[in-house]
Image (cartoon, grey):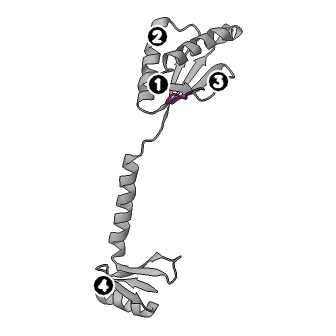
């Protein structure tokens, strides 16, 4: 196996027992870095410190990632104009932060007789957020609710 010393210098291709004794003399561990290569590559390092650095790098990588969340906005078919504008404003905030928005129009009792009122409300909200995001799929009726998911970013048609 090819062995790299604790200071980064090449110790050459040596046997496993020789590599283990060298690592033991330095008071460090022999860690296999690349098993797929021919011959396998090992390094003499402090394994605890090595694991700490790897976890630190993983955490650093996760910091820069943005977790996309789905925020939900619920309306009813007879929601008033001003309330709709407030809900559109909240939806726009969610989209600018990079989150998806699930828009749900809930029907109760006799409201189920006129689903077109709910579709009108949903269409109005979609138009209010059209410049920041677009619907992933057309609005669907699921039981007593009409819902649609709006993703950030505008899909260009054409």
Q: CA distance from mark 4 to mark 2?
A: 70 Å
Q: Nearer the viewer, residue 37 or 24?
A: 37
Residue in the image at 36% along x and 59% along y: 57
Q: CA distance from mark 4 to mark 3?
A: 65 Å
Q: Nearer the viewer, residue 129 or 52?
A: 129
| Callout 4 secondary element | loop
Reading the chain from its start, which is encountered first: label 3 or label 1? Answer: 1
Q: Which residue is mark 3?
A: 138
Q: Quadrant of the C terminus?
A: top right
Reading the chain from its start, which is encountered first: label 4 or label 1? Answer: 4
Q: Which mark is residue 27?
A: 4
Give yes or no for contact between labels 4 and 3 (Cβ–Cβ under 8 Å): no
Q: CA distance from mark 1 to mark 2?
A: 20 Å
Closer mark to the observer between disc 4 and disc 1? 1
**Main secondary structure type of the part rendered in magenta:** loop
Residue 152 colored magenta?
A: yes
Q: Which residue is mark 1?
A: 132
Q: Which mark is residue 83?
A: 2
Residue 98 colored magenta?
A: no
């Amino acid at each position: 196996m090819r062995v790299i010393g604790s200071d980064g210098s090449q110790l050459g291709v040596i046997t496993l027992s020789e590599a283990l004794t060298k690592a033991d003399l330095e008071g460090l561990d022999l860690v296999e870095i690349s098993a797929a290569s021919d011959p396998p590559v090992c390094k003499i390092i402090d394994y605890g410190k090595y694991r700490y650095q790897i976890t630190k790098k993983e955490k650093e990588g996760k910091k820069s990632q943005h977790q996309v969340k789905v925020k939900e906005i619920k309306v009813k078919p007879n929601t008033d104009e001003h309330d709709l504008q407030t809900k559109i404003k909240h939806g726009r905030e969610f989209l600018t932060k990079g989150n998806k928005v699930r828009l749900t129009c809930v029907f109760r009792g006799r409201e189920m007789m006129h689903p077109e009122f709910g579709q009108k409300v949903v269409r109005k909200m979609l138009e209010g957020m059209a410049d920041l995001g677009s619907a992933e799929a057309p609005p669907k009726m699921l039981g007593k609710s009409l819902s649609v998911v709006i993703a950030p970013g505008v899909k260009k048609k054409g």
